[in-house]
Image (cartoon, grey):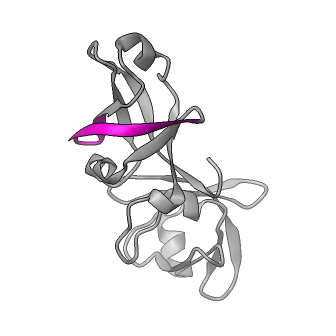
Amino acid sequence: MTDKTLTVATVLKPQGIRGEIKVKAFLDSAEDLKEISKLKIGGVEYAVLSVRAQGEFAYLMLKGVADRDAAELLRGKDVDIDRADAPALPEGRYYIADLLGCETVTERGEKIGVVTEVTPARTDVYTLSDGVKNIVFAAADGVITDIDVAAKKITVNGKRFKEVSL
């Protein structure tokens, strides 16, 4: 992934004998993959012919992937899209790629660390690095007070942060 692309899924396996692939979506919903008309897997661009979504998984038919053998070659690879083609997010929602590398500070300006990982869950779990150790916290209500992806900065309520961090 580069600044111009987003990884939206990973290929799990071929599905059937006609070239369909099963992917695990990294979006809020696998349904969001239906908005994508082209994607890249292993640096090769494919036109999306069809998408069937089931929970966090989707089944994709791609132009140029005609059989199980061709689909098998894609197993384990990331599914990337151009950032310009990414589905629009509602206010207050962000792509994980945009949060990685953000400096996290308290409302008083005390530096805590840099976001190295975000694990999606009912309450997302953020992993920060302060250069020495990792700090993990749940993004529970009232913890994150502001996210400014343009400035690469996340502000947290210091008191709530201490309550939910490990």
Nearest to the observer: residue 130 or residue 84: 84
x, y (%) of residue 85? 45, 58
Nearest to the observer: residue 119 or residue 22: 22
Residue 103 higher or lower than 129, as above or below? below
Image quadrant assignment for residue 108? bottom right
**Residue at 48 percent of width and 23 percent of height:** 74
In the image, taking residue 141 as reference, residue 151 lies left or right, namely right
Q: Does residue 48 show up?
A: yes
Q: Does residue 137 show up?
A: no
**Residue at 28 percent of width and 17 percent of height:** 18
Residue 39 higher or lower than 2, as above or below? above
Range covered by the magenta-colored residues: 44-59
**Residue at 40 percent of width and 70 percent of height:** 93
Check if residue 135 falls in the magenta segment: no
User: Secondary structure of the magenta portion, mostly?
Assistant: strand
Nearest to the observer: residue 137 or residue 97: 97
Residue 53 higher or lower than 103, as above or below? above
x, y (%) of residue 110? 70, 81
Image quadrant assignment for residue 152? bottom right
Check if residue 54 falls in the magenta segment: yes
Nearest to the observer: residue 8 or residue 94: 8
x, y (%) of residue 21? 35, 26
